Image: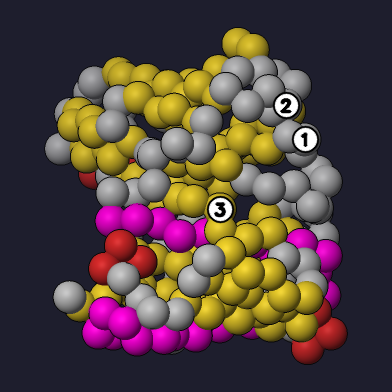
Amino acid sequence: GIQVEQSPPDLILQEGANSTLRCNFSDSVNNLQWFHQNPWGQLINLFYIPSGTKQNGRLSATTVATERYSLLYISSSQTTDSGVYFCAVPKRDDKIIFGKGTRLHILP
Amino acid sequence: ETGVTQTPRHLVMGMTNKKSLKCEQHLGHNAMYWYKQSAKKPLELMFVYSLEERVENNSVPSRFSPECPNSSHLFLHLHTLQPEDSALYLCASSQEYGATNEKLFFGSGTQLSVL
């Protein structure tokens, strides 16, 4: 089945820094979602981005479906950006599977 | 606020207890999901309901029993759990099930500890 790999697994940055998180997937997909899980466990849907680029404030995401990867950019990081970032893609049977996530810690 | 509400927020139970997790969605969605999140593991899909009918059961032990009385409510009944069942249990919903362009909306989860 499709594999989803995220990198890096952990990232520690100073407040104000920029970061790039990567999601690689092993098969073609027509849907990719990025989620942020805050330290209290809440998962928030950030982007639905099967292809192209989207921006929402300091966050943006780009998916290159033909090359099977997606990138999540966070600019001018704030401590509230801390948490775990997941990407999720559907398998052929429509089940959505998640990567293991990137744990981001923004230091004040 | 995602429109998906889970209760309780935290639950501690013994291995002989029976308890239930509750999920309610206010989004008018037709599909609801239970996910399990254990430490250092990807989210695992447990159950899916579409229009109140179970459509997925991913080899989950029978000590977990889901119930979907209507499209807005989803329960997970727990009995004789094991310590390894301790995890964050997340409920999610989407407009429909099976459409690969569906967006998932998650609740805040129930942090379960089994002693």
Q: Which residues are magenta?
A: A12-39
Q: Residue at x 63, y 69 (%)?
A: A55
- Residue at the spot 37% in from the left edge and 20% down from the top edge: B20
Q: Report the mark closest to the observer, 2 or 3.
A: 3
Q: Nearer the viewer, residue B107 or A81?
A: A81
Vertical arrangement, residue B110 with respect to residue A77, above or below: above
Q: Is residue B47 left or right of residue A58?
A: right
Within the image, what quadrant is residue B79 found in?
top left
Residue B96, numbered circle: 1
Check disc 3 and give the amino acid type. Answer: Asn
Could you confirm whether marks 2 and 3 are on the same chain? no
Q: Identify the mark nearer the N-term, 2 or 1.
A: 2
Residue A34 in picture, x, y percent from top left: 58, 64
Q: Quadrant of the C terminus of chain A?
A: bottom left
- Residue B13 lies, with reference to residue A10, above or below; the image says above
On the question of residue B113 being in view, the answer is: yes
Label 2 CA crowd tier, 10 Å (few <14, some 14–19, many 20+)? some
- Among the 4 quarters of the image, the one containing residue A9: bottom left
Question: Which residue is the site of mark 2?
Answer: B30
Q: Tell me the subunit letter for badge 2.
A: B
Q: Residues within 10 Å of mark 3 (few under 14, many from 20)?
A: some
Is residue A36 covered in magenta?
A: yes
Same chain check for tags 3 and 1? no
Name the residue type under label 1. Glu
CA separation in Å, label 2 and label 1: 5 Å
- Please give the residue where the numbered disc 3 appears in the rendered image: A45
Q: Tag 3, which chain? A: A
Q: Position of residue B68 (x, y in %)?
A: 60, 18
Q: Are marks 2 and 1 in contact (CB under 8 Å)?
A: yes
